Amino acid sequence: MKYLITGGAGFIGSNLAQELSKKNNITIIDNLSTGFREFLPKHRNIKFIRCDLLDKNKLIKIFKGHEIIFHLAANADIRFGLDHPKKDLEQNAIVTFNVLEAMRFNKIKKIVFTSTAPVYGMNKIFPTPENAKMTYQNSLYGASKLYCEGLISSYCEGYNFQSWIFRFVSVLGPGYSHGHVFDFVNKLLKNSKKIKILGDGKQKKSYIHIFDVINAIKIALQKSDQKVNIFNLGHNNYINVNKSIKIIETLMNLKPKRFYTGGKSGWVGDLPFVFLDNKKIKKLGWRPKITIEQGIKHTANWLLDNKWILRKRK
């Protein structure tokens, strides 16, 4: 098969490219605005093209001859999204439209899309199933991803596309380049005596490891054949921020004094409880193999062994 991955120099994209390249030819597109050349897998089956996805005409040329598009490129900056609201419109909504149009022009019918748990907004059903009512949105990122889902399903209906949409919780593992584990490790390396924690530390999150994510995507592609296939990807349980920071402190052999900013949410758009129902993907035979605690340790150790990313991602 000949696959194309947008955002393939990012955390999830590069890990996915590494796995898929074992048996397939892979084209990676990335503008390297948040991805890294260091992440690009070195494999004879992988071709890298630096490209801005806002350039639709260039995408139309690059997409030619591919069979499935894995659309992972996005602005994932939830925390600071209000500082640059245009990013979510351009890099999520408009870029997804360009990807779909490039597919339509080249008669490519299959797309895999990485969505997110925040599309559920401030819902009160936990664990949250795929058919939960979409409540009001509290982040530009979540709102833009929900729009992308609607656009993709419309192309499936109107142009006979087929899609696999995955709503992720936060993903951990090698190549992890932003989020709470990144922030905590970075802060403790700079000051081992004290640490500031956003919110009250009681926020509950259900993280998942990148290896389990890739396994779920492969299984869904093999076993789910609806026109629009939507799956939650999250762990069987969750952890609060205080326990997460404790795991990292123990790993780094530190006992810093904690300071909290207060409030149930760490920032505007932060969800105080994220816990997705994963029964649908489990029915296909998938199970998470790496615990949340193991994922946090694996990620923290990877960051400590790859401090270059802490310097680059400031």
Image (cartoon, grey):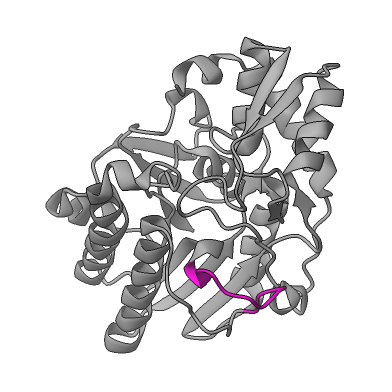
Say which quarter of the image contains residue 107: bottom left
Nearer to the camera, 28 or 282: 282
Residue at 40% of width from left, 72% of height from top? 149
What's drawn in magenta, residue-wise? 119-129
Magenta stretch holds residue 128: yes
Say which quarter of the image contains residue 132: bottom right
Q: Is residue 26 left or right of residue 154?
A: right
Task: Characterize the magenta stretch by its predominant secondary structure.
Answer: loop
Q: Is residue 251 left or right of residue 195?
A: right
Q: Is residue 34 above or below residue 271?
A: above
Q: Where residue 27 appears, x then y in whole percent?
A: 40, 45
Q: Where residue 37 appears, x then y in whole percent?
A: 43, 25
Q: Is residue 120 among what the camera can see? A: yes
Q: Is residue 20 above or below residue 188?
A: below
Q: Is residue 132 above or below residue 203?
A: below
Nearer to the camera, 158 or 81: 81
Nearer to the camera, 302 or 129: 129
Residue at 48% of width from left, 62% of height from top? 115
Q: Where residue 156 appears, x then y in whole percent?
A: 36, 82
